[in-house]
Image (spheres, rainbow, N blue to C red):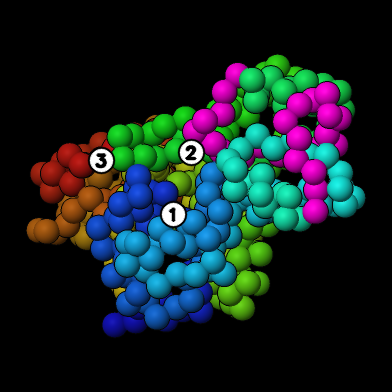
């Protein structure tokens, strides 16, 4: 049997919700990545930690990772800023200390007040960000500073659930200023192209759990994508996904890297038959043992091919009903 990894020469892996959740390895993730035998690049929208810190945490959960295997959205945001700055220019950084140090190491002056006339405001995730930091950013932007964000994820998956993400913090500044920042991270294609270049990859596979960032970014970069059901976006989100957020492959978790790519593609399978009835997909039939994944791939293939606005799935058989009990 052919395996998905045999079609690719590198993995561009999301972290939160794909490799780990709240710092704990997602079941089967470490083993699947190591077994793939491919160069793994960890591409994360989380700008609150340095590449070195991320690599250390990856090693803590059992992955052989170095700083060179990590690309953060803070690094990508700094890349956007460099075209607008000269050496020594003042930059207001809303974000973690590691983000501020990254900016200092690049030769710029990190300031904390709008009164220091920053040329650029860089906004990255930091759990400690509060009213004062957001207000200084708003004042600087009102006075003409260029506003750049590491990413616009509205939520951040943690062990207790979905916490407030950088995009939600950015929304407060946008509300106060009327300025929407240019974002460096996913779903833009830049991080994916940069990660592929760093990996020396000609046929990378982008892997993630979130359709509007991980998958949309891979699609924008023109890369095949694998969506895993271990994080934010579930079957319902897949059913309603716009064209630019539709993955090439759908798997339960990272063990799908070793699966037959033909089985992972959205298409009728598991003995299910399907038809579109108004705003619903009607799932019928089903072989004994067919479950959620077969139902998902069958249902979304019909929804996507129909061109209609499909919002729900309806079971028309006992097997389909049992499979849809786990729909979310």
Q: How far apart, in angstroms, are the residues tagged by discs 2 and 1?
A: 33 Å
Where in the figure is residue 219, as x and y percent of width and height? 58, 56
Does the rendering let one see residue 188?
Answer: no
What residue do we see at 78% from left, 39% from top? Answer: 91
How many marks the image carries: the answer is 3
| Disc 1 versus disc 3: nearer the observer | 1
Let me know if residue 83 is in the magenta part.
no
Q: Secondary structure at mark 2?
A: loop
Judged left or right of residue 39, residue 47 is: right
Asked if labels 3 and 1 touch by Cβ distance under 8 angstroms, the answer is: no
What residue do we see at 48% from left, 43% from top? Answer: 241
Q: Along the polypeptide, which appears first: circle 2 or circle 3?
A: 2
Q: Along the polypeptide, which appears first: circle 2 or circle 1?
A: 1
- Residue tagged 1: 15
Q: Which residues are magenta?
A: 107-131
* As drawn, 240 above or below 220: above
- Residue tagged 3: 327
* As drawn, 22 above or below 311: below
Where in the figure is residue 103, as x and y percent of width and height? 72, 49
Q: Quadrant of the N terminus?
A: bottom left
Q: Along the polypeptide, which appears first: circle 1 or circle 3?
A: 1
Where in the figure is residue 138, as x and y percent of width and height? 73, 22
- Residue tagged 2: 308
Q: Secondary structure at mark 3?
A: loop
What residue do we see at 40% from left, 72% from top? Answer: 64
Judged left or right of residue 125, residue 19 is: left
Q: Secondary structure at mark 1?
A: loop
Q: Nearer the viewer, residue 94 or 84?
A: 94
């Amino acid at each position: 049997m052919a395996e998905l990894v045999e079609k690719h020469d590198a993995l561009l892996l999301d972290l939160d919700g794909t490799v780990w959740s709240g710092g704990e390895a997602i079941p089967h993730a470490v083993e699947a990545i190591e077994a793939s035998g491919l160069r793994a690049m960890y591409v994360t929208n989380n700008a609150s930690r340095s590449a070195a810190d991320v690599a250390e945490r990856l090693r803590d959960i059992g992955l052989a990772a170095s700083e060179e295997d990590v690309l953060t959205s803070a690094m990508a945001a700094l890349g956007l800023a460099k075209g607008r700055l000269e050496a020594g220019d003042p930059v207001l950084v809303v974000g973690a200390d590691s983000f501020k140090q990254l900016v200092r190491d690049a030769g710029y002056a990190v300031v904390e007040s709008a009164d220091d006339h920053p040329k650029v405001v860089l906004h990255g995730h930091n759990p400690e960000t509060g009213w004062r930091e957001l207000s200084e950013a708003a004042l600087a932007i009102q006075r003409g500073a260029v506003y750049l964000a590491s990413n616009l994820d509205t939520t951040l998956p943690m062990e207790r659930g979905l916490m407030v993400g950088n995009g939600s913090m950015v929304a407060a500044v946008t509300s106060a200023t009327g300025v929407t920042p240019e974002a460096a991270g996913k779903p833009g294609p830049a991080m994916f192209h940069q990660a592929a270049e760093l990996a020396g990859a000609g046929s990378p596979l982008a892997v993630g759990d979130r359709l509007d960032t991980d998958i949309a970014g891979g699609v924008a970069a023109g890369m095949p994508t694998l969506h895993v059901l271990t994080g934010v976006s579930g079957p319902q989100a897949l059913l309603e996904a716009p064209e630019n957020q539709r993955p090439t492959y759908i798997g339960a978790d990272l063990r799908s890297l070793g699966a037959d790519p033909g089985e992972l593609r959205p298409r009728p399978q598991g003995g299910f038959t399907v038809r579109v009835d108004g705003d619903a997909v009607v799932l019928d039939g089903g072989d004994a043992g067919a479950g959620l994944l077969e139902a998902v791939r069958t249902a979304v293939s019909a929804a996507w091919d129909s061109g209609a606005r499909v919002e729900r799935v309806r079971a028309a058989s006992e097997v389909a009903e049992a499979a849809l009990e786990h729909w979310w």
